[in-house]
Amino acid sequence: MAAPKKYRAPVLADVAKAAGVSVPTVSRVLNGTKYVAPELAQRVNQAVAELGYRPNGAARSMRSGKRTLVSVLAGATANYGYARTLEGIETAAQRAGMSVSITVVESADDEHVQRAVDLALSQPTAGVVVLEFDRAGIEAAMALPEGLPAVVAGGGSRRTGAVPAALIDEGAAGRQVTEYLLRLGHATVHHIAGPTEGKPSGRTEGWRSALQAAGAPVPAVMNAEWDATSGYRWGERIAGLDDVTAVFCANDDIAIGLMRALSDRGIHVPGDVSVVGFDDQPLVALWRPSLTTVDQDFEDLGARAFELLSRLVDGEADLAASVATPQLVVRESTAPPSGISMS
């Protein structure tokens, strides 16, 4: 059996040969810099289509002086919030005729951070968006050189420093969740928080401030990882407690793990314990019971980050943060505590 042919991307010379014109003629047609007879232009465009030729964006940006690449630095790409934010950036960039390069920051170690920043900036980038969801992202944002157009995207309602930010106000959402559960009649709300990432958690701060404002007891925070297994382990502990009637989880994965552990031990959600998640991942609406959660519009976050970066690249300065408040989505996993009617 013959070895398969290796793919070779067509170049300008291939287009010129197929169209029966010179390389400079092809260049003039593609760049639109000089007049070319319509018949020649048609031949060139037909050859481009038949060969699948794609212009070299880096070379083109060097000639025009306008860069069309956006570099994104992220501590992860597979996690739900990261992936949807990247999707928002890519969609907005595509509409603007720009492309996106993604560089993963392996950890918050100085070596990994600097390697990722160097790799991202080795390309002809117009500017950088940093996903500041974790410690690696925070460190990457701090390692960027001054003067580079850069924007961060993450949680919060404000950010110190000169780098503009697109934000989701997690604190407001944490307050909203806690106030809702208190209105249902729960004496307090327990909280399973995610890992600390080098900055205060808006979700936890919002939960605590709502309890304090209501004069309700503030239970000790239960710290977990971001995965369902960690939520399950906390569910095993909560199942043995009599004073827990409502739990606010830092994300949907934790909430799903918690509910499974409670169910395995004969504890009903929401009859015995109400559970709220955070993120509104696609499948939680189909869980039984369907999960009350907070809808974070990550695609919008990515689009807002790209818009800020575009304005920076165009020369605007002193840009205010772009802040959106996520919304509580009430489903079947929450109810008044046993013995209390809302009628």
Image (spheres, grey):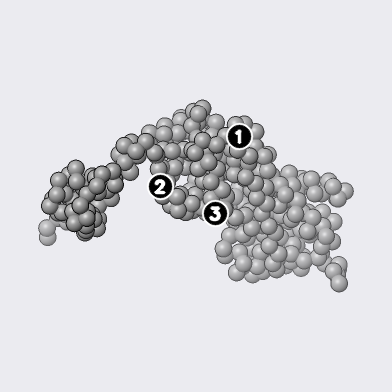
Q: Earlier in the sequence, mark 2 or mark 3?
A: 2
Q: Can I make out residue 258 in this image?
A: no
Q: Residue furthest top?
A: 146
Q: Quadrant of residue 342?
A: bottom right
Residue 300, horizontal then vertical, whole percent: 57, 53
Towards the viewer: 14 or 235: 14
Looking at the rendering, in which quadrant would you find the N terminus? bottom left
Name the residue: 33% across, 36% down.
62
Q: Give, as a three-letter code, the residue at label 3.
A: Glu
- Mark 1, Cα crowd under 10 Å, few <14 / some 14-19 / many 20+, is few
Name the residue: 30% across, 39% down.
59
* Residue with the mark numbered 2: 99
Towards the viewer: 159 or 110: 159
Please give the count of numbered marks on the rendered protein: 3
Name the residue: 82% across, 62% down.
184
Q: Give, as a three-letter code, the residue at label 2.
A: Ser
Q: Earlier in the sequence, mark 2 or mark 1?
A: 2
Task: Find the distance from the CA under tag 2 to the CA under tag 1.
Answer: 25 Å
Locate residue 147 relative to residue 30 in the image: left or right. right
Task: Find the distance from the CA under tag 2 to the CA under tag 3.
Answer: 17 Å
Q: Give, as a three-letter code, the residue at label 1.
A: Asp
* Residue with the mark numbered 3: 299
Q: Earlier in the sequence, mark 3 or mark 1?
A: 3
Note whether 225 is above or below 292 in the view shown.
above
* Residue with the mark numbered 1: 318
Q: Please, what secondary structure does the residue beneath circle 3 have?
A: helix
Note whether 287 is above or below 81 in the view shown.
below
Q: Can I make out residue 271 in this image?
A: yes
Name the residue: 59% across, 44% down.
166
